[in-house]
């Protein structure tokens, strides 16, 4: 089992991730993590905070001489902005400390429900943790999982398919996906859509508004048979959907055709099965599909076809022309509070969704192939591939 937890406030000293269950013997360096952290910080529409930070991970435990040793991996990312917030966020009690209180909750943010639930008079105690800054720690944990998945030939990428209402036309996906997507300021593969998306972000910024969008996550090289149909909580589609839905501001998740499948007849919603070409199909049991409407998941299990997931992000809740709210101190109507923020973070959300996908998939690999050591997992994986091949050996050769 792979488990992880994070800690840290947006303007606190640092973020921390603890990842447990990664097998021993995986080569790992801080740069493996740093690459994804840097990718998460980019994207047109980010605010001034991203000019302050330069996220890097320190490996505090679980790695020795460049290899994991099977113990929990603790990753630390310092907040550079801490230097500007130390007085406000310091854990020690000080009467005269500046508070930078937030008392006019932002509709769409965790401010109000969090302040009520945790009995806080200052919603800063809520927003500091609800802030999507926390996702840097997830991306660090995800980068380690991505490294493990690479041993088994899995590649995870993402791209933005919709931003601010601009929908990118479907196009064939390049491989590796991220090499192409990361070259775009909005991580969009369709050159014609990019300027329109940028224009929507600019217009929203000028209007004191924000925009949302949709990122598509693609995992290639995933072996058939991860997850299980036998119990609700072992279905991989459920785990993936939960993981993506847990990303701040994500309000919708689709797999394959997703909501579109509901309107189609069965004959147009499924993926006909055929034999894979002779040279391919070692991770799909010798089968292939003419289409991939299922998004690589049937019965809660991987089919061996690429996983296709989409996550829809609502517009960021911090508005420079705020919506109506109520002041927690006075109970009187007031405009919601504005804070420095981003106009959009959809490009970053795709990178975060990759990380969450990697964490769930790495967990599924460890579950299926056992995993105290990478070499042990590898043996079990090879044994499974041999099992898949043995079945094919009974078949007539393809003519
Ligand atoms: C965020 C507000 C902004 C974002 C932040 C998420 O931060 P600040 O309040 O410091 O300007 O930049 O995202 C990050 C810091 C990050 O690393 O992604 C919010 O309120 O959710």
Image (cartoon, rainbow, N blue to C red):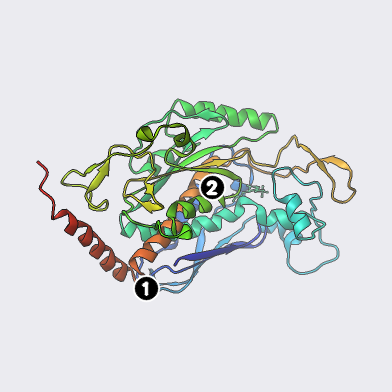
Res 106 quadrant in image: top right
Res 206 quadrant in image: top right
Point out the residue furthest to the front here. Answer: 266
| Point 68% across, 33% down: residue | 209
Which residue lies under the disc numbered 1? 372
Which residue lies under the disc numbered 2? 41
Please provide percent x and percent y for residue 44. Answer: 55, 37
> Split into 4 quadrants, where in the image is the N terminus?
bottom left
Say which label, 2 or 1, has the lower sequence index.
2
Please provide percent x and percent y for residue 113. Answer: 74, 52
Say whether mark 2 is within 8 Å of ligand 1: yes
Would you say 180 lies left or right of 109 here? left
**Mark 1 residue element:** loop
| Point 71% across, 38% down: residue | 319
Please provide percent x and percent y for residue 220. Answer: 34, 48
> Split into 4 quadrants, where in the image is the C terminus?
top left
């Amino acid at each position: 089992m792979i488990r992880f937890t994070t800690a840290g406030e947006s303007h606190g000293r640092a973020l921390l991730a603890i990842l447990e269950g990664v097998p021993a013997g995986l080569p790992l360096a801080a740069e493996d993590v740093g690459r994804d952290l840097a990718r998460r910080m980019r994207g047109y529409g980010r605010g001034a905070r991203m000019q302050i930070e330069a996220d890097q991970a320190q490996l505090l435990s679980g790695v020795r001489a460049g290899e994991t040793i099977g113990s929990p991996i603790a990753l630390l990312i310092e907040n550079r902005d801490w230097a500007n917030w130390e007085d406000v966020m310091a854990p020690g009690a000080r009467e005269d400390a500046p508070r930078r209180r937030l008392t006019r909750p932002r509709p769409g943010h965790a401010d109000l429900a969090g302040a009520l639930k945790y009995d806080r008079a200052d919603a800063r105690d809520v927003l500091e943790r609800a802030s999507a800054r926390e996702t840097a720690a997830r991306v660090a944990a995800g980068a380690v999982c991505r490294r493990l998945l690479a041993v088994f030939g899995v590649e995870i990428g993402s791209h933005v398919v919709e931003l601010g209402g601009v929908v990118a036309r479907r196009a064939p996906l390049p491989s590796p996906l991220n090499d192409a997507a990361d070259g775009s300021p909005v991580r969009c593969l369709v050159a014609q859509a990019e300027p329109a998306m940028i224009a929507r972000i600019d217009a929203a910024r000028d209007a004191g508004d924000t925009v949302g969008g949709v990122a598509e996550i693609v995992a290639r090289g995933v072996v058939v048979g991860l997850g299980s149909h036998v119990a609700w909580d072992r279905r991989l589609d459920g785990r993936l959907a939960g993981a993506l839905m847990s990303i701040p501001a994500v309000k919708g998740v689709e797999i394959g055709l997703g909501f579109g499948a509901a309107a189609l007849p069965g004959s147009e919603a499924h993926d006909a099965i055929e034999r894979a070409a002779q040279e391919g199909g070692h991770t799909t049991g010798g089968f292939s599909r003419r289409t991939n409407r299922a998004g690589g998941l049937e019965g809660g299990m991987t089919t061996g076809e690429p996983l296709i997931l989409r996550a829809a992000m609502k517009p960021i809740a911090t508005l420079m022309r705020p919506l109506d709210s109520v002041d927690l101190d006075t109970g009187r109507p007031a405009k919601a509070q504005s804070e420095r923020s981003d106009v959009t973070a959809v490009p970053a959300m795709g990178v975060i969704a990759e990380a969450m996908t990697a964490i769930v998939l790495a967990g599924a690999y460890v579950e299926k192939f056992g995993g105290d050591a990478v070499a042990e997992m590898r043996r079990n994986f090879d044994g499974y591939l041999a099992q898949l091949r043995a079945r094919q050996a009974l078949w007539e050769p393809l003519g």
